Amino acid sequence: MLTPAEWEIVALSLKVGGVAVLVTLPLAFALAWLLARGRFPGKVLVDGLIHLPLVVPPVVTGWLLLLAFAPAGPIGGWLDSWFGTTVLFRWTGAAIAAGVMALPLMVRAMRLSIEAVDRRLEQAASTLGAGRWRVFATITVPLSLPGVIAGVVLGFARALGEFGATVMVMGSQPGRQTLPILIYDRYVTGEMTSAAPAVVLLACVSFAVIVLYNRSIFAAAHERG
């Protein structure tokens, strides 16, 4: 059984994962639509940059985020001078790191869903007098919704299980640990047995994510079939 302190860590992990996905969702969908429908020079480079966190070690991503959000960094300096705050070693920094790591998976799932939308339906709506935004809101978004849901589910799972980038940005101190950081901390201190409930919980969440993802994919295939 989890202790009250461990339940607080669970709540913090859910908070970090949820905020990461919600904040990343608009950007992920915009990038997915750009890659699916856009034609512009350097598209391959943009695609590669978006998916870079999938192949770069998470600690490298965390290190880059540390540089960017440090008080002397380009983003951290702006936050400090305008708002007098920082996101480093706080749950907000962990949410940013988790969002960066989740972004590629979200973009990929949404892009595939947008590319699968029948362009003839959009053209027919335009022919009947619907404007671009109305076509987007009534045709593109509803038909790509299963892929959006799949992207959100995958992104949340990635954010919830993120360790490397998160520990670099948030650290590992009481009161600012996520479940993966807690498990690693218990391993370092030789308390592996006490980490079992957290491991089981993460495994159950991962299993639920797989089920939800498969349901989203099957729903999308059924609608298109």
Image: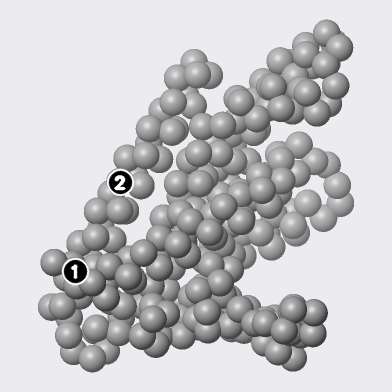
Q: Residue at x 19, y 72 (%)?
A: 3
Query: Could you tell which of marks 1 and 2 lies nearer the N-terminus?
Result: 1
The reply, left or right, for residue 9 in relation to residue 189 is right
Is residue 160 at least partly visible in the picture?
no
Task: Point out residue 138 in the picture as x, y percentages from the top left corner.
Answer: 69, 22
Is residue 44 at least partly visible in the picture?
yes
Task: Point out residue 9 in the picture as x, y percentages from the top left corner.
Answer: 34, 71
Task: Point out residue 62 in the picture as x, y percentages from the top left corner.
Answer: 56, 79
Instruction: Specify the color scheme.
Output: one colour
Q: For the residue labelled by badge 1, is the local secondary structure a helix, a strand or a loop?
A: loop
- Image quadrant where residue 64 sits: bottom right
Q: Is residue 211 above or below residue 48?
A: above
Q: Amino acid at mark 1?
A: Leu
Q: Is residue 2 above or below residue 33?
A: below
**Residue bearing the label numbered 2:** 208
Query: Is 102 or 15 nearer to us in this picture?
Result: 15
Q: Residue at x 40, y 85 (%)?
A: 172
Q: Is residue 163 above or below residue 50?
A: below
For this orientation, the residue located farthest to the top is 128
Q: For the residue labelled by badge 2, is the local secondary structure a helix, a strand or a loop?
A: helix
- Image quadrant where residue 65 sits: bottom right
Query: Is 116 or 160 nearer to us in this picture?
Result: 160
Q: Amino acid at mark 2?
A: Ala
The reply, left or right, for residue 145 in relation to residue 182 is right
The reply, left or right, for residue 9 in relation to residue 81 is left
- Specify the label residue 2 is tagged with: 1
